[in-house]
Image (cartoon, coloured by chain):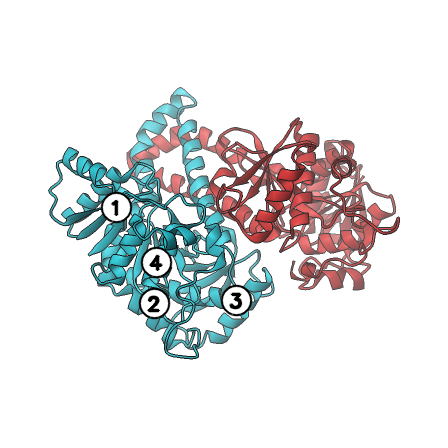
Chain colours: A cyan, B red
């Protein structure tokens, strides 16, 4: 069962509801939190059978809150908080948040809590490479803003475990995103993380390839690219933006002359296929890793198809036991944070950086 | 007269020499430092008239040095150090370095020195937008790794003055690169720089638009995008890499079927035009701003055409009095660092971060 927060999507809760209905048709079971009136109207309009989708009226949204950490604490009735609580209480196995990464993270941290020994959750986004047809997973794309050495090291293990579990890559090739390939290149934190990952390379369930530069991200030579949430978010949006800009320019070029128009028309099916290959909506969004249960965060501007993919991604992640896999990978490598006692501290206090999400 | 370091280019000093000859044909005067045997052979091979290009035999290269700051100090005979010294001593007006940003920066800092009141030089790269046909200048793309608030603020003024002088934009639209548009989004340094730029907005010779995200960089709504050298370098290489990857995928799509091949052939002239529009080599490379004279840093993998453009870019920059313009813009805005005495301190000591360039 996937708990879904329908509030916060750019196209409204009805679009998320339509996505939930599509996912339910393909076998998912959804607990949907949002404005019931909008949701019911949307479901009625598309004539969706309601089996597989249970609606909980939760009109309060904190998706656009400037201080999601505070909002998640002070609004227990908010849809995303209710969705996270459903997971914490065992009524659902994972959650999907249609809008507001900050709200998803805050609600997850307060209710589902950080997995024991994990410093910080990370948003991991699998990106299709238009050249190789493979996938490269970029993390963190924005769960935190800044990262310390130990965070980047854990992200490497989290990303590698995700890639093994979801994409079946036996020994993922993992690299740090930097401004040069040499080990001494990069911010102080990147250089430190590089050194620690080299030290840990022997026992790691992945191959650490060192640094990659921006131009290498989509080139197909790595499976996991590790970076802080600020750089990762900028990088992700650059990839999406440059792709859209260039495909637009190709389209423009294809209408610049009579000959080009004829050529463009003949090329259209291939170009459509390319566009759909790299369409972020077809992917379903980012995995939120590092909590005690899985989260999936689609883009707020997605349509129903994207939300359906997000719900199915969460559903498959539960079957793949993604949370257990990522955690046992960290544990086996001795990369978990050490505790004084048996109870994980700080799980009830999200990072200060959360305020800025 | 432009002092050019021919060492460090991927294709060797001969390729830079050929570029210098091309630039000289278009009116530039070049003082060329590098391995004279290679340079003379290259010039003889292309049958270039040698007027306009004076060759100085300087076989020592520090372009690939792991510690360019130390190398620039300990190897006064290195080609880039000689080129920078030629500028410092008035034998040349600007310099071009064909390989090794770190070496160019170190040699510039030691010999030409930082402009008075400038915290740190920045590499500013004008990027063509394939949609608008306009240009957006990204800085810093890698002169430093990390930046403080006051650095980002100065970069905004430097980038705006460059855009006004070189591209004739009356009031450039300047923005900070961040992981969200709201003013509270971003790393601590970005949030602080945002606040200071808002304070300074009234008297500034540019419009400060706040934050932009990665997807907005090439969208045409801003003229100058300010960021730290780490993020800027990653961003630049992502833009180049994603562009190349996508155009490659379009080419691949255009050979996937008989129909596509026919379409691709008809579309070819338009696609070629698009590719040349966004070709980094046609631009000539990045401006190194913040020294007492102008530097231009082309990409080490450029061919002769790219080096010729770099030399012409430096030559035009001298005519445009770029160094004076950028400096007086900072001075007029009161954005220069304040000094105790008349002599700028620290100009002989480059930042520790330089070691990692």
What residue sits 59% from the left and 34% below the top? B223
Of the two numbered discs 4 and 2 in the rendering, the one whose residue sits closer to the viewer: 4
Asked which secondary structure carries label 4, the reply is helix
**Which mark identifies residue A149?**
3
- Nearest the viewer among B19 and B189 is B189
- N-terminal-most mark, 4 or 2: 4
- Chain holding disc 1: A
How far apart are labels 1 and 3 at the CA level? 39 Å
**Which residue does the numbered mark 1 point to in the structure image?**
A58
Q: Is residue A43 visible?
A: yes
Estimate the x, y position of residue B240 in percent, counting from the top left: 52, 44
Horizontal and vertical percent for residue A45?
Answer: 16, 33
Front tag of 4 and 1 = 1
The mark nearer the N terminus, 4 or 1, is 1
The quarter in which the N terminus of chain B is drawn is top right
The answer as to whether the residues below labels 2 and 3 share one chain is yes
Residue found at the very far front of the displayed protein = A74
Residue A143 coordinates in the image, percent (x, y): 43, 55
Q: Earlier in the sequence, mark 4 or mark 3?
A: 4
- Nearer the observer: mark 1 or 3; the answer is 1
Q: Residues within 10 Å of mark 4 (few under 14, many from 20)?
A: many
Q: Earlier in the sequence, mark 2 or mark 1?
A: 1
Element under disc 1 = loop
| Gap between marks 4 and 2 measured at Cα | 17 Å
Q: Quadrant of residue A251?
A: top left
- Circle 1: is it few (<14), some (14-19), or many (20+) Cα within 10 Å? many
Label 2: which residue? Answer: A326
């Amino acid at each position: 069962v996937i708990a879904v927060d329908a509030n916060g999507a750019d196209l409204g809760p009805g679009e998320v509801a339509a996505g939930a209905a599509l996912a339910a048709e393909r076998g998912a079971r959804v607990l949907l939190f949002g404005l019931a009136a909008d949701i019911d109207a949307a479901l009625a309009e598309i004539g969706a059978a309601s089996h597989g989708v249970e609606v909980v009226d939760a009109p309060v949204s904190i998706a656009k809150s400037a201080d999601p950490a505070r909002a998640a604490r002070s609004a227990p009735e908010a849809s995303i908080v209710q969705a996270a609580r459903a997971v914490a209480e065992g009524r659902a196995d994972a959650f999907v948040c249609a809008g507001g990464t900050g709200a998803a993270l805050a609600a997850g941290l307060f209710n589902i809590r950080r997995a024991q020994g994990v410093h910080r959750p990370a948003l991991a986004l699998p990106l299709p490479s238009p050249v190789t047809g493979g996938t490269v997973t970029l993390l963190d794309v924005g769960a935190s803003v800044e990262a310390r050495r130990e965070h980047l090291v854990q992200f490497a293990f989290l990303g590698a475990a995700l890639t093994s579990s979801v994409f079946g890559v036996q020994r993922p090739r993992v690299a740090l995103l930097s401004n040069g390939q040499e080990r001494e290149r990069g911010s102080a934190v990147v250089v430190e993380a590089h050194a620690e990952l080299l030290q840990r390379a022997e026992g790691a369930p992945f191959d650490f390839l060192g640094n990659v530069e921006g131009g290498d991200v989509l080139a197909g030579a790595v499976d996991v690219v590790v970076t802080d949430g600020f750089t990762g978010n900028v990088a992700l949006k650059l990839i999406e933006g440059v792709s859209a800009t260039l495909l637009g320019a190709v389209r423009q070029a294809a209408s610049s002359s009579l000959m080009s128009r004829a050529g463009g028309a003949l090329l259209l099916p291939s170009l459509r296929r390319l566009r759909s290959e790299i369409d972020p909506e077809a992917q379903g969004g980012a995995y939120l890793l590092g909590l005690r249960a899985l989260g999936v965060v689609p883009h707020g501007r997605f349509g129903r198809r994207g939300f359906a993919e997000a719900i199915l991604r969460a559903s498959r992640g539960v079957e793949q036991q993604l949370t257990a896999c990522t955690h046992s990978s960290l544990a086996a490598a001795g990369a978990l944070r050490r505790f004084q006692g048996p109870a994980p501290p700080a799980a009830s206090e999200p990072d200060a950086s959360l305020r800025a999400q």
